[in-house]
Amino acid sequence: MRILLLGKNGQVGWELQRSLAPLGELIALDRHSVDGLCGDLSDLEALRATIRQIKPDIIVNAAAYTAVDKAESDVELADRVNGEASRLLGEEAALLGALLVHYSTDYVFSGEGHRPWQETDAVAPVNRYGASKLAGEQAITVSGCKHLIFRTSWVYGARGNNFAKTMMRLAKDRETLSVIADQIGAPTGADLIADVTALTIRQVLQRPELSGLYHLAAAGEVSWHGYASYVIEFAQTNGEQLAVTTISAIDTTAYPTPARRPLNSRLNTQKLRDNFSLHLPDWQSGVIRMLREVLNK
Ligand code: NDP
């Protein structure tokens, strides 16, 4: 089994290097070319040539244009990386008879209401990043290739920057933090996403009828304010010296950004859990694990 992993150094890509390794021969690329192989999703023809050269049985695409605010002005590149490259991967996977695994986002939804989104709900992205990710998943669906598309939310990894680390850094110097309290979702570990990916790949290879679109997020829900409070309380209880005394809850409208964010990022994961007999742990257990790793506790 030959597996091509794209975006190997992103949060999810890094964890996939670990979780995919036991499944077969793993060829992992980032945006830089090595040995004549191109993993740059903005260079469509070189990417196509690379796939034809490698002839993978499985393509896992963890690369994406993820700079949500920048995508508002960098539309052409966001669309190429998230939309057109995904189309190309779908086309090439279909030609090879390969399985394509791809990641998308709750940002394909409007963010209205309070109900967790189901895979069958109407999409209506509120920003350019969401629109580009939607174009990517739709292109893969119509390509006719065997695929697993996982829409996820609020991804963090122990490696690299994440919201929890930023909150701890700010809490060291500031007495008051203001954090958005009206956006609700589930922080989801890159390690969980990578493990679920490996488990579902094994099953879909045996049962191709499981191919499709799935929502994948940790269980439970919280606001960014609740998440920040949880992280800071954990850090303080575990001996971190923080200056912060007040964590104020603010509305999204008090923190304007170039890209609008959906308020309701809840994802209903029933389909994934039922089809693959999986259990998804609550968001707190993964966050604690990441915090222990980061704080060395
Ligand atoms: P990261 O931003 O951590 O990783 C994305 C990776 O894509 C980076 O390594 C980046 O490389 C790479 N990349 C960007 N542009 C290109 C390009 N032109 N060619 C090749 N590689 C490129 O994202 P995550 O791991 O968090 O995200 C994984 C998936 O999950 C993505 O599909 C994302 O849309 C989705 N998702 C993420 C969420 C989140 O909160 N992060 C929420 C919901 C969905 P470089 O570092 O060199 O720029």
Image: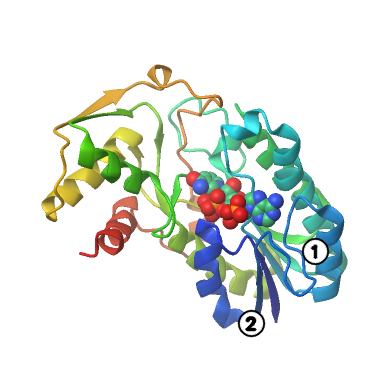
In the image: residue 154, left or right of residue 258: left
Disc 2 crowd, CA 10 A, few/some/many (<14, 14-19, 20+): few
Query: Residue 41 has which mark?
Result: none
Instruction: State the residue at coordinates (19%, 51%).
Output: 235
Q: Is residue 213 visible?
A: no
Q: Report which quarter residue 110 is drawn in.
A: top right
State the residue in front, 246 or 251.
246
Instruction: State the residue at coordinates (67%, 73%).
Output: 205
Q: Where is residue 140 in the image (x, y as percent from the top left)?
A: 76, 51
Q: Position of residue 246 (x, y in %)?
A: 17, 30
Q: In which quarter of the image is the C terminus?
A: bottom left
As displayed, is residue 10 above or below residue 78? below
Say what amino acid the circle numbered 2 marks: Gly
Q: Report which quarter residue 181 is drawn in.
A: top left
In the image: residue 234, left or right of residue 201: left
Question: In the current view of this chain or complex, which residue is farthest to the front?
Answer: 173
Numbered disc 1: secondary structure: helix
In the picture of the structure, the residue carrying the numbered disc 2 is: 24
In the image: residue 112, left or right of residue 59: left
Q: Report which quarter residue 245 is drawn in.
A: top left
* Mark 2 in CB contact with mark 1 (< 8 angstroms): no
State the residue in front, 154 or 274.
154
As displayed, is residue 112 above or below residue 184? above
Q: Distance between the residues labelled 2 and 1?
A: 17 Å
Instruction: State the residue at coordinates (37%, 26%).
Output: 182
State the residue in front, 160 or 130.
160
First reached walking from the N terminus: tag 2 or tag 1: 2
Numbered disc 2: secondary structure: loop
Query: Residue 93 has which mark?
Result: 1
Q: Can residue 1 be seen in this view?
A: yes
